[in-house]
Amino acid sequence: MLDSQSDRPNLVVEGKLSDNERLKHESDFLRGTITQDLQDPITGGFSADNFQLIRFHGMYQQDDRDIRAERAQQKLEPLHNVMLRARMPGGIITPEQWLVIEKFAEENTLYGSVRLTTRQTFQFHGVFKPHIKNMHQVINAAGIDSIATAGDVNRNVLCTTNPVESELHAEAYEWSKRISEHLLPKTKAYTEIWLDGEKASTTEEPILGETYLPRKFKTTVSIPPNNEVDLHANDLNFVAIAEDGKLIGWNVLVGGGLAMTHGDTATYPRKADDFGFIPLEHTLAVAEHVVTVQRDWGNRVNRKNAKTKYTLDRVGIDTFKAEVERRAGVTFGPSRPYEFTSRGDRFGWVEGVDGKHHLTLFILSGRILDFPNRPIKTGLRKIAEIHKGDFRMTANQNLVVAGVPEDQKDEIERIAREHGLIDDLMTPQMKNSMACVSLPTCPLAMAEAERFLPDLVAEVEELLAGHGVPQDHIVLRVVGCPNGCGRAMLAEAGLVGKGPGKYNLYLGGNRIGTRVPKLYRENVSPQVILEELDILIGRWVRERNPDEGFGDFTIRSGVVAEVKVSKRDFHA
Ligand code: SRM
Ligand code: SF4
């Protein structure tokens, strides 16, 4: 369903469409031949187009890269399995659901872990073909699905966890669910294939279109002053505007995204642009038409330039915004004032306005597993067995035990402490560090990230202590490749994998996630990075203004130039 405006030649990129466009078009609304592939016992993997199509159902085909070469030597195919990513708008999961997913991971996955992600949901890694259908049936029976958590669609919608202002959060959370539902694919392919639902032919996708979006699309709902969701990583953002504690509308920001390709200056991380204020009643229309404009004008020829951020830079912000206004029948008002002052999680207990208690737990890289001396998976199972509230997965890969009544606080804290879920000695540096999954499961990884983070943080902690500021921190993030899943491109110091043991070092993001950092050193070892950080931390400690963060210091002192407009400044 193309809008007549979309045919204007300067708005649509001409050329041979990418092969993903063909496969979406031929997929019979995301069905492909997945069912046949599932029954093929010869291979553990999915063939041809199905390899891509299962993504729209929330799965990625992977193999363990640590053992890939060894298996090839033995003339075995890679140990194919799938990673599943659930759809959990706003990241809320009940204790009953927790017990179901934890049990499934324990009994049916290669690694036995549940992995909390940077987008407030969980992943299973290492599910073999014979378990895939059962996995969907098990999670669905618990009220969870994985529709549209990957592929060229709107992904899991984020919502600031903010348990303190519970009323505002409850409203914002409801909106994140409504937006997620509104933008979901309408095809019944998921139900048919995985849940043995009745075959129902699909004739149209009124919002996403029959070939879906040109590329992945990401949406957030945030509640200032916390920018936990890192809205500038997202295509579409609703920033809550409240009056007298009541939600009245949103400032809408469009066109953020963090990925780039090494060596390709036509790709860059970019902040979202402010479109202005809308009252609540226009939320779904605006969400729908930011999506339809991107659907019709996004680049379907070159996937590297297909995201909304590039569409905005190509057609112009005003043109894009005017088209959203025209289609949605809405005029954006002037933006309302708001301020972000943080984006980290508040660890430990906080009390909400409803008198309930909320315990935020730090989960290293979101990996839930029983580690030596830190059996956190067992600990969370025990908490889930008695917990009467819910759990909230944060966009920083952490977990909030939310809605705890006064008389259960002590018991929950005792279990958490006994299982290594609370560590009073944890430094601010550790709490402000993050890594993407990377090796061994990510096929795109160029360097270690999750497995490398603990050592890196320990070294940076030593540097801070050496300069006499052990309780200070840098927002430090490591990603295994320039796709940037751990949002290194919004960090004060971001390491981006370039090759085994080699990273690019980016500096100059700020503490609240509203500035993209800039390249400082290219293709260097962790040792070189630590030497550079040692010098810069020393300067920061000696020369900083009161309360000046490391990233702000690197800009003010000219260590790196500020990225104001990504297209112009990022590669300059
Ligand atoms: Fe991501 C691809 C993991 C958040 C940008 N991402 C991948 C894949 C699926 C690799 C692949 O395509 O085969 C990774 C699977 C690794 C594994 O073994 O689990 C992967 N991404 C993740 C997660 C699990 C990282 C984490 O440590 O938590 C996050 C899951 C989010 C979720 O629950 O939906 C995750 N990915 C992000 C983010 C951060 C965010 O959204 O806040 C980004 C940067 C923001 C953005 O989109 O610009 C991100 N991932 C990418 C990209 C680059 C997209 C692009 O614009 O070019 C890819 C590659 C692609 O899509 O081609 C990618
Ligand atoms: Fe994989 Fe790269 Fe994403 Fe890390 S940033 S999870 S290495 S795609």
Image (tube, rainbow, N blue to C red):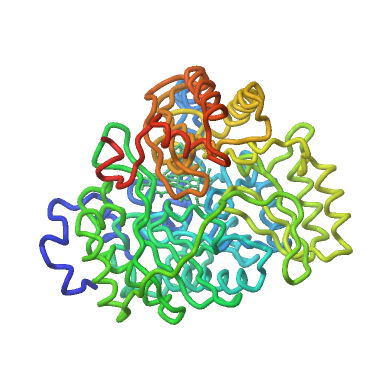
Measuring from the top left, give residue 390's x and y in whole percent: 71, 63
- Compared to residue 320, the image places residue 499 above or below, namely above
- Classify residue 295 as left or right of residue 134: left
> In front here: 179 or 258?
258
- Extreme residue toward the left, this view: 9
Ligand 2, what quadrant? top left
Give me the residue at 62% from left, 23% from top.
Answer: 467
Q: Is residue 63 visible?
A: no
- Number of disc labels: 0
- Classify residue 281 as left or right of residue 208: right
Give me the residue at 44% from left, 33% from top.
Answer: 554
Give me the residue at 85% from left, 64% from top.
Answer: 406
- Classify residue 520 as left or right of residue 239: left
Q: Is residue 509 visible?
A: yes
- Compared to residue 301, the image places residue 548 above or below, namely above
Measuring from the top left, give residue 489's x and y in whole percent: 43, 41
| Quadrant that contains the N terminus | bottom left
Measuring from the top left, give residue 474's x and y in whole percent: 56, 36
- Residue 329, image quadrant: bottom left
Give me the residue at 37% from left, 35% from top.
Answer: 518
> In front here: 241 or 408?
241
Measuring from the top left, give residue 253's x and y in whole percent: 39, 62
> In front here: 491 or 337?
337
| Quadrant that contains the C terminus | top left
> In front here: 287 or 379?
287
